[in-house]
Image (cartoon, rainbow, N blue to C red):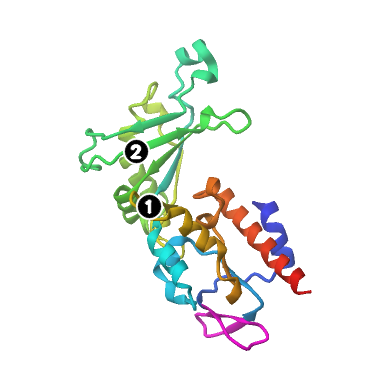
Amino acid sequence: MASVAKIPLTQARVQFNTTVTSVENVEGGQLPVCVTTSDGRKQYFDDVVVTTPLGWLKQHQDCIRPLSPRIASAIESMSFGRLEKVLIEFPVAFWESAATKADGGTDDAISFVHWLSPSYATSTNPRKWRLECVSFHAFPKPYRRNILLFYTFGDCSSHITSSICGLQDKERDGWLQDFFEPYYSRLPGYTENCAPLRFLATEWCNDEFAGNGSYSKFQVGMADAAGDVEAIRHGMPEQRIYFAGEHTAPFDGLGTVAGAYTSGEKIAERIIGSKEILE
């Protein structure tokens, strides 16, 4: 992350704690795009790349002016998920039993677990929300860790994030332990000596600037999913307003950090290329 951030931090003027309220094309100005912030300031630019998540765009379409009808339709059509992640670190990778290690080493390691419809945690999960987890101990060295990464979805994610919102330290960890213990404690090798060391949980559903969700998804019945992505990806070059983020990434990078990064690079290349043509 440090290497990725180095260039913008050293060569750009980054404005922290600043909320943008509108991005607007203004006709006839020397700098054609006006960015207005919540303190009333107006700043003008040659081109603007809007990198907000799809969820934010769905909630604030009126902040991009003018927004082309095709892009507005694409933003409405695409869905925005509520996936959340909870990482739990343990003193040992207890789920890797001695028998498994003796038989086949890491080739037989437990790398993925899926609880389809758990019925044994009625006090914390009465709706039997499904859960998934990935073992970081299945990674090759030096990336191997005694960590289970849990994935939650939809209403389950909303329940967790709303429950831990505002909680701190032991109170937060205690809530997460009560919720997840019925699942990790059923993995092979678990004993009371394997109590978690710490928890780390995302709260994208609580983040207004993330659009109260995680990343784009495509529901059954979409009429033109590929066309929707391509429309947002193309942006509005005639207005000098572009979009970048995982929702505009190459199709094999949608929903990923790598895809979001790639989308930004491609937009930068397009803008630079447009300047070279004008020159």
Which residues are drawn in magenta? 23-43
Q: Amino acid at mark 1?
A: Arg
Residue plotted at (39% across, 68% down): 59
Q: Secondary structure at mark 2?
A: strand
**Residue 113 is drawn in which quadrant?**
top left
Res. 82 mark: 1
Q: Please identify the residue farthest to the bottom as the structure is shown.
A: 28
Judge whether 201 appears above or below 34 on screen.
above
Quadrant occupied by the C terminus: bottom right
Instruction: Give how far apart the Cα atoms at labels 2 and 1 are.
Output: 13 Å
Judge whether 100 appears above or below 220 on screen.
above
Side of 123 where 1 appears, left or right: right
Q: Residues within 10 Å of mark 1 (few under 14, many from 20)?
A: many
Residue plotted at (53% across, 57% down): 248
Q: Is residue 125 magenta?
A: no
Q: Amino acid at mark 2?
A: Leu
